[in-house]
Image: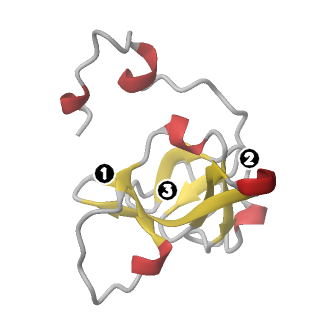
Amino acid sequence: MTQGSAERDPTRWSPFHDKKGVPVCAGDLIKSYHFTGARRKRYYLYHVASYEDGHWMMVPASWADPNEKRDGGKCRIYQHYLEDAEVIGGCGPGDILDHEDRPRVAPAACDCKTCTTDPDERDLAEDW
């Protein structure tokens, strides 16, 4: 599969992108804002993107050992989770080896059900 290929393997290429427009691929290391501590120090979380059971997931980087199965600490990826996150490492599928060499996409507003519906009316159980 090449960079210009119209068909992309959905288990390797996600429909999501980071704040800089870098497409997220399976195995990418994602840095996302967690909280601001004392003296305005910003703390971050590090996750690895993975495709599991038909869903794109963010798995804590400390759990990235493929030989060990754990539950908890991981979440499904939605575009609004990546609005302040960035891909900081990873090898893409095919001949796009580095995350910095991937074609960028223009940032777009998230259209997932969680973002577009009124918080008082949405049913979050359907998203999970």
Going 48% across and 22% down the picture, which residue do you hit?
111
Q: Is residue 97 left or right of residue 57?
A: right
Helix, strand, or loop for circle 3? strand
Q: CA distance from mark 1 to mark 2?
A: 22 Å
Horizontal and vertical percent position of residue 49: 47, 63
Q: In which quadrant will I find the C terminus?
A: top left
Q: Which mark is residue 87?
A: none
Q: Which residue is mark 2?
A: 104
Helix, strand, or loop for circle 2? loop
Between residues 27 and 12, which one lies in front from this camera angle? 27
Q: Which residue is mark 3?
A: 13
The three-letter amino acid code for the residue at tag 1 is His
Q: How many marks?
A: 3
Horizontal and vertical percent position of residue 94: 57, 71
Q: Quadrant of residue 98?
A: bottom right
Going 22% across and 58% down the picture, which residue do you hit?
53
Reading the chain from its start, which is encountered first: label 1 or label 3?
3
Closer mark to the observer between disc 1 and disc 3: 1
Reading the chain from its start, which is encountered first: label 1 or label 2?
1
Note whether residue 6 is visible.
yes
- Evaluate if marks 2 and 3 touch, with contact meaning CB atoms under 8 Å apart: no
The three-letter amino acid code for the residue at tag 2 is Arg
Q: Is residue 96 above or below residue 104?
A: below
